[in-house]
Every structure is written in C-alpha cells, then in structure tokens.
Amino acid sequence: MALAVMLLNGASFHSGCCRRKVFLSSLGPLLSNSKLYSSYRRPGAEPEKKLSWQNADFSFKKSIDHLKTQLSLLKKETQDYLKGPGGNPLSQHLLEQTRVLWQFRSQEDLNKWVISSDVEIGGKSKVYIKLGRNNQAALLYGTLNTEVPRDGETKYSGYCSMRSKPEVGSFNRKKYYDWSNFNSLYLRVRGDGRPWMVNIYTDPYFSHQKDDLYSYFMFTRGGPYWEEITIPFSKFFLSSRGRVQDNQHPVWLDKVRTLGFTIGDKVDGPFQLEIDFIGLLNDRAHKEKFAYEAYDKNTPV
C-alpha cells in the first residue's frame, strides 16, 4: 500500500491526463474503497474537487483484519460447497419444495435492502422503509411525485424502488442465487391497491447485457388483509433500459443477482407496501416453460 501512495505522489503530470488515467485504473485492486470510474452526476451539479484515490484508507492493521475475515469466509464457503448445493445435503436439495429467501424481523433484515427514488435524477418522490407492527414485516412507504425536474434533459419522473443488496463472497467475489430448482416466486404482502413491478436482475454473460431486466406485475388489492401472491418465473419478460425486447427468453435462474420492487404508476400521492416474507415455490401443477413467443433469428430456408 505504501508503494502505491509513493507512486501516486510521484507520478508525473506533465505527460498528459490520459496517461494518468490509465495509471490510476491499473491500481484499482489496491484502492478498493475509492471510485476510480466516473459515476452519474446530475446536470448542473459540481464535480468532486477531491481526487478519488485520496479517500482511500491505507492501514496495515485493517488490511490484516480484512484478510483474516476473508479467509474465514472462504473456509465456510468451501465447507458448504463440499456439503452440497447451497450448503445442504443433495437429498434435501432435490426434495426441496419451498424456500424462504428474505423475511423481515429485525433491522439487520432491512439492512439487506436498498431503497431509491427519482431524487437521484432530480425528482421529488420520497421513499422510506422500516419495520412494521410488532417487527413482523417490512413497511415500504412514501410519496410518488411525477413532476419532471427542470434540467433540460430528463423527460420522465415519478418512481420509487426497493432492491436487495447483491451477495458478495470472499475476496469480493460475485455470488449468485441459484433458483433453478423452483418455478415460482412466492410472497406474502399487504398493499394499498396500487400495482408494483417485480424485477429480477441477473448477471450478464456480455457487457452489452448489463441493463437487462426481467419484470412482471404484482397487483395488490388493498384492505386490511394479507394476501399470498405466486408469480411463475415463466411470466417474467425481458426489458432493457425501459424497453421491452422483441427477442424474449426465460430468466437465467442459476445466475440471479438481486430482486427488486418498483412503483411508477404515474399517480401522485402516498403509497405503502408491507412485505412479510419473500420465498420460492416449486409448483408441480405449473407446467408452462415460457409464456411468450420466442423468435427464431436464423429461420431455415
């Protein structure tokens, strides 16, 4: 780490900014806490005056503690892998009919999720999340505002969302959810009658697929009663950057990264959604493989 600091302080700035950017990008693994790549900045916002690498914390003690933590995680992952899929015996994995992914009983359960709204692009919608009554559910609530920010670029506004944090393995490796043993998403919710969009994010094989999103609707009926909703994975359709794609294909259930909920029904006003748990179901009565027509690009002559 000290070597990295010396190199940064001694780097020559007379050879042009392009060479410096290439040099900084090569030190990415050493500066894991800094942002070396440009992020979205709302039009009119001032750029950061402090260089990104200056926010890095070079501490030998913290590095040793972090290494110990990662090695313990690697040990646990190895033990789970040797035990069977998902850390369970193979017989249990094959006979598994249901699985609870997330339930909300403490603040630690809420910390596994991230909320966002159109405030990121200058909008005025507000969203909050907290534990419900008797700490038995997650209460997602707020106010939707479709007023478009006056920045000269944004054309649409008015959305709020809740998204699970992606799992990270030892040494910051990507981890995926493997839902290939199930065919439906199973939820217990209580809403206010407004429709929601359930979103599944998968890890793409190619960089141009990074904006791919699988979505389907969830309609809440409102009222004081809870409802149990089953959504088959065959119903989820593919979209990219808000546009439904012509070339549809089923969800890659073995490479799921995160799950999310979005409200954007263009109706100003308050909303709320209570979620008791989110799980998976293997419905033997559901035989549908894919609900949408798949086009053959290379039609035989």
Image (cartoon, rainbow, N blue to C red):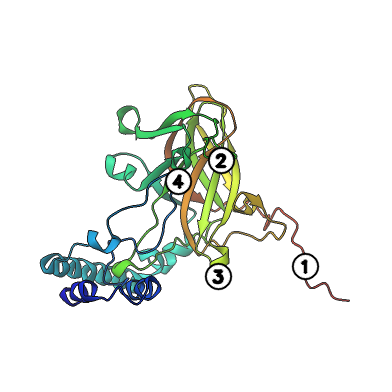
Foreground tag (1 vs 3): 3
Depicted 94 relative to depicted 199: above or below: below
Looking at the image, the residue that sits furthest to the front is 14
Which quadrant would the N terminus be assigned to in this image?
bottom left
Dot 4: element: loop
Which residue is drawn at the image coordinates 37% and 74% (left, top)? Answer: 16
The local crowd at label 1, few if under 14, some if 14 to 19, many if 20 or more residues have their Cα within 10 Å, is few
Question: Is 151 displayed left or right of 35 in the figure?
Answer: right
Q: Amino acid at mark 2?
A: Gly
| Residue 270 in picture, x, y percent from top left | 48, 24
What residue did someone put label 2 on?
152
Q: CA distance from mark 4 to mark 3?
A: 28 Å
Determine whether label 3 and label 2 are within 8 Å by CB.
Answer: no
Foreground tag (1 vs 4): 4
What residue did someone put label 3 on?
206
Foreground tag (4 vs 3): 4
Q: Amino acid at mark 3?
A: Phe
Q: CA distance from mark 3 to mark 2?
A: 33 Å
Dot 2: element: loop
| Residue 114 in picture, x, y percent from top left | 38, 45
Q: CA distance from mark 1 to mark 4?
A: 41 Å
Q: Quadrant of residue 162?
A: top left
Query: Which circle's residue, 1 or 4, is located before the other in the chain?
Result: 4
| Residue 293 in picture, x, y percent from top left | 75, 57
Query: Which circle's residue, 3 or 2, is located before the other in the chain?
Result: 2
